[in-house]
Image: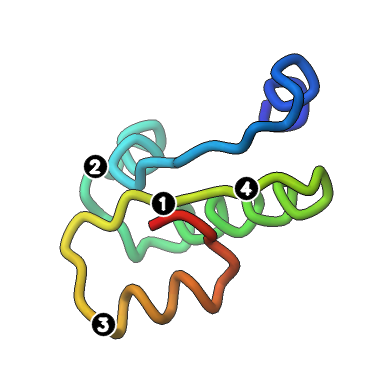
C-alpha cells in the first residue's frame, strides 16, 4: 500500500497511527503487540526503500518512547 501511495503522490511520506493499526488487527490499543510492531517495521522498511520520511503518532509521549521510535527510523513524531 505504501509503495503504490507514494508512487502516485511523488513520495511525499506520511504518518501512521498506532491505534489505526491495532484497530485493523482487532486489538485496539495494544500498541506493543507484536502485530503492531511488525506492521511498524514493515512500513519503515518500505519508506526507506522509497526514500520517503515516515512518522508516527506517539499517543503517550515520554523521552524513552520518543528515543526508541527515532532510533527505529521514524522521522516525524
- The residues tagged by marks 1 and 2 sit, at their Cα atoms, a distance apart of 16 Å
**Residue situated furthest left in the rendering:** 60
Which quarter of the rendering shows the C terminus? bottom left
Q: Is residue 68 left or right of residue 4?
A: left
Which quarter of the rendering shows the N terminus? top right
Q: In the rendered structure, find residue 43 and report the number of the disc placed on it.
A: 4
Q: Is residue 54 left or right of residue 58?
A: right
- The residues tagged by marks 4 and 3 sit, at their Cα atoms, a distance apart of 23 Å
Residue 76, given in percent of the width and then of the height, sits at 46, 54
Upstream in sequence: badge 1 or badge 2: 2
The answer to whether the residue labelled 1 contacts the one labelled 2, judged by CB atoms less than 8 Å apart, is: no
- The residues tagged by marks 1 and 4 sit, at their Cα atoms, a distance apart of 10 Å
Which quadrant holds residue 66?
bottom left
Q: Is residue 52 above or below residue 40?
A: above
Q: In the rendered structure, find residue 63 and report the number of the disc placed on it.
A: 3
Provide the residue designation for mark 1: 56
Q: Is residue 50 left or right of residue 70?
A: right
Provide the residue designation for mark 2: 28
Residue 60, given in percent of the width and then of the height, sits at 16, 63
Q: Please name which of the two marks, 4 or 2, marks the residue nearer to the observer.
A: 4
Upstream in sequence: badge 3 or badge 1: 1
Q: Is residue 37 above or below residue 47?
A: below
Q: Secondary structure at mark 3?
A: helix
Q: Secondary structure at mark 4?
A: helix
Residue 25, given in percent of the width and then of the height, sits at 40, 37
Amino acid at each position: 500500500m505504501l509503495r503504490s501511495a507514494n508512487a502516485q503522490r511523488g513520495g511525499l511520506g506520511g504518518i501512521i497511527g498506532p491505534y489505526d493499526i491495532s484497530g485493523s488487527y482487532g486489538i485496539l490499543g495494544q500498541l506493543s503487540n507484536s502485530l503492531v510492531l511488525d506492521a511498524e517495521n514493515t512500513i519503515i522498511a518500505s519508506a526507506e526503500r522509497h526514500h520517503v520520511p515516515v512518522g508516527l503518532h506517539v499517543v503517550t509521549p515520554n523521552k524513552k518512547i520518543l528515543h526508541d521510535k527515532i532510533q527505529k527510523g521514524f522521522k516525524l513524531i
